[in-house]
Amino acid sequence: MLTAGAALACGVVMAQPAPPPSSNAQPSPPLEAGAPVEAPPVEAPPLVEAPPIDVPELEPAAKLPEAKKEPPKPVPPPPPMKRVRAPAAVLQAIDKVTARSIRFVAPVGKPVRYQNLIFTVRACEMSAPDEPRDGAFAYLVIDSQPRQAGRQGRQVFRGWMFSNSPGLNPLEHPVYDAWLVSCSAAPPAVPAGKS
C-alpha cells in the first residue's frame, strides 16, 4: 500500500473520507448506480443597468496655424578693408645697354628723373590685411624726355605696376627696364639747401 506522500509523487489520488455533514445541510438522497448527477441550481445575481453618462459634445479641435518657415537670412560679408596709401614708391630701374641698375624712392605726385625717363607716381598702395597676398601697387606715368634740345618727349608707360608680379604690366622700352619694389612709409628727406 502506498503512503499519501508516495501517492502524490506518483500522481495517484487516494480516496479521502467525506467530511461529516453539517447540521444545517439537508441530507442528499442516495445515488443510484449509473444515474446522472445534476449540479444544484446556481442563482445568478440580478443584472444591474449602469446609469447613462451625460457627455457634452466636444467642439472639433481648432487647427493651429502652420508656422511659416522662412529661409535663414544670409549673413552679409564684412566690408572689405581699405588698402593703406603710402606717400612714396620704391622703384628699381636698369639700363639694358650699360647694365647699370638703381633703386630709388619717388614721392607721390613729384616727377623723378632716371637717365632719359621721368617717373611720376600717382598713387602707391599696400595690400589690405584681408587680401590673400601681400604686395604693393603703384599707378605710374613714365615719360621719355631726351636731354638733347629739340627732341620731343613722349609717354612710354601709364598704368598700375605690382610688386609681387613685375611681369604682369611691365615697362616696354628698348633701352630701360623698371619695376615697382614696394611702397615707402615716408617720402625721402630732402637735403637742406635743395628744394
Image (cartoon, rainbow, N blue to C red):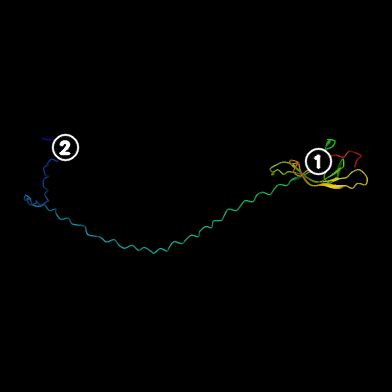
Q: Position of residue 14 (x, y in %)?
A: 13, 40
Residue 193 is left or right of residue 39, and the answer is right
Q: Check the image and report above or below for 52 versus 169.
A: below
In 3D space, how far apart are the residues under numbered discs 1 and 2 (Cα atoms)?
Answer: 121 Å
Mark 1: few, some, or many residues within 10 Å (few <14, many ≥20)?
many
> If you read the primary sequence from the N terminus, does the residue marked by circle 1 or circle 2 appear first?
2
Which residue position holds label 1?
A: 178
Give 129 or 89, whichever is nearer the viewer.
89
Q: Position of residue 105 (x, y in %)?
A: 83, 40
**Which mark's residue is nearer the viewer, 1 or 2?**
1
The residue shown at (15%, 35%) is 6
Whether pointer 1 and pointer 2 mark residues with C-beta atoms closer than 8 Å, the reply is no
Give 88 or 154, whichever is nearer the viewer.
154
Mark 2: few, some, or many residues within 10 Å (few <14, many ≥20)?
few
Q: Amino acid at mark 2?
A: Cys
Residue 10, label in figure: 2
Q: Is residue 185 visible?
A: no
